[in-house]
Amino acid sequence: MTDDERAALETERFQALALLHHQQGHAAMAGESAEFCGQCGNDIPAARRKALPGVTLCIGCKAAEELLERRR
């Protein structure tokens, strides 16, 4: 794979994650849980979505966010 192909794939990935993040922001305002994490794009388990209406982060990303907050 060439550098140009890698760059194009990375651009597509970034755009897809940005769109997902945008869509999930609107879903969270409506109280709906996101199916995919707004940070990493991984699936958010159905049990987590049900337990936390409006959730937008997977468990791993939420834990990392909370760790960073505690360090501040």
Image: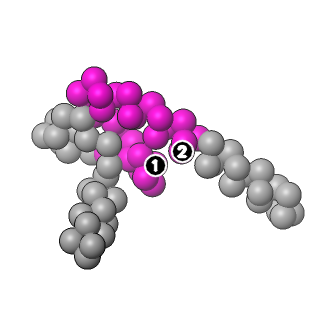
Residue lying furthest bottom: 71
**Residue 43, can we see it?**
no
Residue lying furthest left: 51
State which region is magenta: 16-44
Residue 27 on the magenta span: yes
Q: Mark 1 highlights which residue?
A: 41
User: Who is closer to the viewer here, 72 or 26?
Assistant: 72
Judge whether 34 appears above or below 12 on screen: above
- The answer for how far apart the CA atoms under marks 2 and 1 are is 7 Å
Percent from the top left, x then y, of residue 52? 16, 40
Judge whether 71 appears above or below 69 on screen: below
Q: Where does the C terminus fall, quadrant-wise?
A: bottom left
Residue lying furthest top: 30
Question: Which residue is located at x 19 percent, y 34 percent?
Answer: 53
Task: Please indicate whether residue 31 sits to the left or right of residue 36 in the image.
Answer: left
User: Who is closer to the viewer here, 14 or 46?
Assistant: 14
Q: Where does the N terminus fall, quadrant-wise?
A: bottom right
Indicate which disc residue 17 carries: 2
Q: Earlier in the sequence, mark 2 or mark 1?
A: 2
Task: Please indicate whether residue 1 sits to the left or right of residue 44 in the image.
Answer: right
Instruction: Report the amino acid beneath label 1.
Output: Gly
Indicate which disc residue 29 carries: none
Judge whether 47 appears above or below 9 on screen: above
Question: Which residue is located at x 39 percent, y 42 percent?
Answer: 36
Quadrant for residue 44, please give it: top left
Q: Are marks 2 and 1 in contact (CB under 8 Å)?
A: yes
